[in-house]
Image (spheres, grey):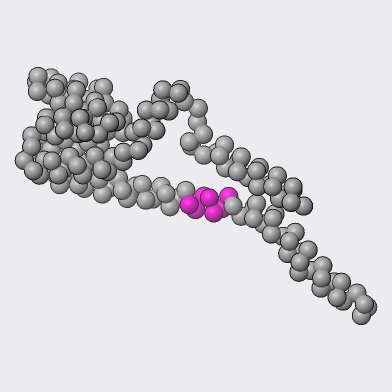
């Protein structure tokens, strides 16, 4: 009985991990880079950039500070140097990882329109936090629905063994 419950639980965990988006196979280098980038949430980078801009630093210095102080953002120092040399905006941001694109888009929009970059970055960070919260809530709901079958398979035999069988045994002498 216990072996059956363990087998069902192992099967459920195997199905759950196989269907999860993280189970995709990637090259080792890409997995390492994504793991390092995932340790620093983009919301933190956006808020730090907004704070540095609010302190009066120009965009190139903000990018340089972020690149030097946050490990996965090293490319931002290169972007700062390219911008100081007067290169085209899109060309400067080519070597940057995709997870930093919200920073690039917000700064580019602020540069083109003259909008305050700090408030754009703070709003972008709040938007990303909301998206992350929604994704986590969805994963929690998926986990709950995937957990119903293994728990049912484990709980039903124990209910029968501890609830129904003693009742039938207690009623047998009276029949």
Q: Position of residue 76 (x, y in %)?
A: 21, 28
Instruction: Kindly indicate the quadrant of the structure image that contains residue 12.
Output: top right
User: Foreground: 17 or 112?
Assistant: 17
Horizontally, residue 49 falls left or right of residue 144, namely left
* Dominant secondary structure, magenta: helix
Horizontally, residue 27 falls left or right of residue 81, namely right
Q: Position of residue 61 (x, y in %)?
A: 11, 31
Q: Which residue is located at x 42 percent, y 49 percent?
A: 136
User: Foreground: 94 or 166?
Assistant: 166
Q: Position of residue 127 (x, y in %)?
A: 28, 47
Q: Position of residue 3 (x, y in %)?
A: 74, 47
Quadrant (top left/top right/bottom left/bottom right) for the C terminus: bottom right
Q: Residue furthest bottom?
A: 174
Q: Is residue 79 magenta?
A: no
Q: Is residue 143 magenta?
A: yes
Instruction: Kindly indicate the quadrant of the structure image that contains residue 91.
Output: top left
The mark total stands at 0
Q: Residue furthest left?
A: 56
Residue 116 in view here: no
Q: Which residue is located at x 36 percent, y 47 percent?
A: 132
Residue 164 in view here: yes
Q: Which residue is located at x 16 percent, y 33 percent?
A: 65
Residue range corresponding to the magenta coloring: 140-146
Horizontally, residue 115 falls left or right of residue 166, namely left
Q: Compared with residue 89, is residue 141 higher up or lower down, i.e. above or below?
A: below
Instruction: Kindly indicate the quadrant of the structure image that contains residue 169.
Output: bottom right
Q: Compared with residue 155, is residue 77 higher up or lower down, i.e. above or below?
A: above
Q: Which residue is located at x 38 percent, y 31 percent?
A: 34
Q: Compared with residue 12, is residue 38 higher up or lower down, i.e. above or below?
A: above
């Amino acid at each position: 009985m216990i072996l059956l419950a363990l087998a069902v639980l192992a099967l459920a965990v195997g199905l759950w991990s196989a269907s999860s988006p993280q189970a995709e196979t990637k090259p080792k280098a890409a997995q390492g880079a994504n793991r390092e980038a995932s340790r620093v949430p983009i919301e933190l980078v956006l808020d730090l950039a907004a704070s540095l801009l609010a302190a009066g630093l120009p965009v190139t210095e903000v990018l340089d500070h972020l690149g030097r102080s946050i490990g996965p953002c090293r490319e931002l120092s290169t972007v700062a140097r390219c911008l100081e040399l007067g290169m085209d905006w899109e060309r400067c941001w080519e070597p940057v990882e995709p997870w930093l694109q919200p920073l690039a888009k917000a700064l580019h929009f602020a540069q083109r329109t003259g909008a305050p970059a700090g408030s754009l970055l703070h709003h972008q960070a709040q938007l990303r936090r909301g998206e992350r919260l929604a994704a986590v809530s969805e994963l929690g709901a998926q986990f709950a629905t995937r957990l119903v079958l293994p728990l049912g398979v484990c709980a039903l035999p124990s209910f029968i063994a501890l609830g129904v069988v003693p009742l039938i045994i207690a009623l047998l002498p009276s029949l």
